[in-house]
Amino acid sequence: MEDGTFMTYDVIIVGGGPAGFTAALYASRASLKTLLIERFFSGGQMATTEIMENYPGFEQPINGLDLAMQMEAQAKRFGAEVVFDEVTEVDLEGDVKTVKTAYSKFQGKTVILSMGASPRALGVKGEGMFKGRGVSYCATCDGALFKDEEVAIIGGGDTAVEDANYLSRMCKKVYIVHRRDELRAVKVLQEKAFNNPKIEIVWDSVPDGILGNDTVEKLIVKNVKSEDLTTLNVAGVFVAIGSKPNTKLVAEKIKMSDYGYILTDEYMKTNIPGVFACGDIREKPLRQVVTAASDGAIAAFFAEKHIEGIE
């Protein structure tokens, strides 16, 4: 569509994770002309999860990619269109929004942003190889897979220490590997960790490599002061050094938190009328597939209400 013409939709959804596809399902089922644009593959981070045990409705674990494919097919069944392309620019002001991709231009009465967030990676040898096979970025998602095993968690902030306390309920032992000689977590979380006999803190240390065969078997850590290497025999490595919201597309165009997450109200509304945000990209206390799906449903519902208002 390089001739300057536009395809016009009621709802344009940017991002095809569980939030985006749930929004597409609810919007298309409400007979809204719906377009979802995803730059890589359906499912987002969910699609990289080998085993999901905590998404409601599945007695047996389901593969994240399989669930993503089901979500996509369900949205398409009600008429949602799915385009795999990269959004390069958005104009969110006015009653009609414009979304440009590498190959096309689209207009929409509403836009739902659901580009997700990316966990910060360690950048050490073996991390990519064992992602989903012992390396995890979500303790509440995958912790139960390591019952009675020894695991390590990397980080020293609130999330890392809270996750360590959580993992200790099911794991035999939990190492907290922290690059400094004191934790950054709030004192109440620190005290819980210090008083937990299952938790051992490895101070002044950083990951140096992850080893194993089919799954993780060892974590090599290096002391940042002595540079000595130590091997921890663990079945799982949980990375809790923060995440980065994928908000580059809308930088300086929409109101965000100090950490770069989009601010919304409980209706998923942003500060721009007709623009909604849902899933991991928005400021929220819990980032899970089930909460992303909930966000998507709410965003689509109030996108419909917005359209009714301007029409």
Image (cartoon, grey):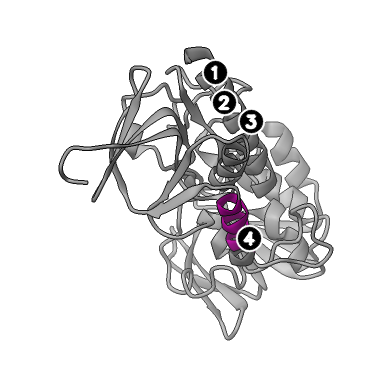
Q: Could you say whether the residue bearing mark 2 is in a helix, strand or loop?
A: helix
Mark 4 against mark 1, which lies toward the viewer? 1
Reading the image, the residue beneath label 1 is 308
- Cα separation, mark 4 vs mark 1, equals 30 Å
The residue type indicated by label 4 comes to Gln
Q: Position of residue 134 (x, y in %)?
A: 62, 70
Point out the tag, 4 or 3, that comes first from the N-terminus: 4
User: Is the residue under label 4 in contact with that under label 2 (CB below 8 Å)?
Assistant: no
The residue type indicated by label 3 comes to Ile
Reading the image, the residue beneath label 4 is 70
From the viewer's perspective, is 249 left or right of 129? left
- Cα separation, mark 1 vs mark 3, equals 16 Å
Q: Residues within 10 Å of mark 3 (few under 14, many from 20)?
A: many
User: Is the residue under label 1 in contact with that under label 2 (CB below 8 Å)?
Assistant: yes
Q: Position of residue 238 (x, y in %)?
A: 61, 59
Point out the tag, 2 or 4, that comes first from the N-terminus: 4
- Cα separation, mark 3 vs mark 2, equals 10 Å
